[in-house]
Image: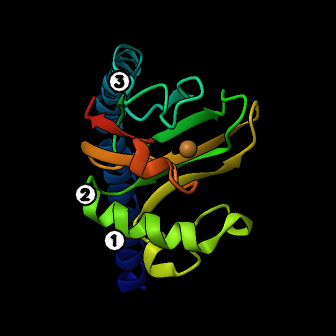
Amino acid sequence: MKNRIWLVGLLVGLLLLVAACGGTPPAAPVSDGGDEDHESEAETSADAGEEEMAPTGEGVVLEIGIKGEELAFDKETLEATVALGAPVTVKFTNTSKTQEHNWILFDHHDMDQASVFNDVAVAAGAESSYFPQEEKYANDVIAHAENQQPGSSTTVTFAAPAPGEYLYICTVPGHFVAGDWGTLTIQAP
Ligand SMILES: [Cu+2]
């Protein structure tokens, strides 16, 4: 009997201790937590401010056409300041009145490699939009706009590659060798 009272007393004591311990620790973190919440809110709004200042992660839109009736793009160079992986949209308009054109962007700036690609592309024929059907060639391509008839336009979107220079060409027969190509320069924000 005496033992049982002791046991009950011990249990009550333990419960009080647990309640006290359980109650006390949260009390301190609650006020700390409040400060932390405040700090993280401040950080979040600071980040949002930075995003507005520098377009990190935001996409860019580029436009390119054809230089009159020449076998050349109207822009020999395109430039984009864009973070790796952010969306780059290219609106390609065939402003020529007589020629069809396409736009193919490589993951390199190697004219010899492009020349080999171009030969295969021309051989692929108009029904393939002068684009190689073999995967090993397609792997060199970041993006491509299919043949556009005079006056028509199309839009392609791709993930921005790493900063560097990338070659774009037109594979309509005779165009690349005549100078229907240019350079896209990607710069880090
Ligand atoms: Cu062309």
Residue 47 numbered mark, or none:
3
Quick check: 81 above or below 133?
above
- Residue 91 on image: x %, y %: 61, 33
Snapshot quadrant of residue 3:
bottom left
Point 53% across, 81% down: residue: 134
Q: CA distance from mark 3 to mark 1?
A: 54 Å
* SS at badge 2: loop
Q: Earlier in the sequence, mark 3 or mark 1?
A: 1
Q: Which residue is at a point 37% across and 70% down the rendered structure image?
A: 116
Q: Nearer the viewer, residue 30 or 61?
A: 61
- Is residue 182 left or right of 129 when viewed as pictured? left
Q: Counting residues from the N terminus, which is met first, the one under dot 1 or under dot 2?
A: 1
SS for dot 1: helix
Task: Compute the Cα span from label 1 to label 2.
Answer: 83 Å
Q: Which mark is residue 110?
A: 2
User: Is 118 or 133 nearer to us in this picture?
Assistant: 118
Label 3 element class: helix
Q: Residue at x 55, y 36 (%)?
A: 90
Tally the marks: 3
> From this viewpoint, is residue 159 visible?
yes
Nearer-N-terminus badge (3/2): 3
Label 2: how many residues lie within 10 Å, few (<14), some (14-19) or many (20+)? few
* Residue 10: mark: 1
Distance in Å between CA atoms under marks 3 and 2: 39 Å
Q: Where does the image place residue 40, in percent across and percent down from the top left? A: 34, 28
* Residue 10 or residue 183, whichever sits in front: 183
What amino acid does circle 3 point to?
Asp
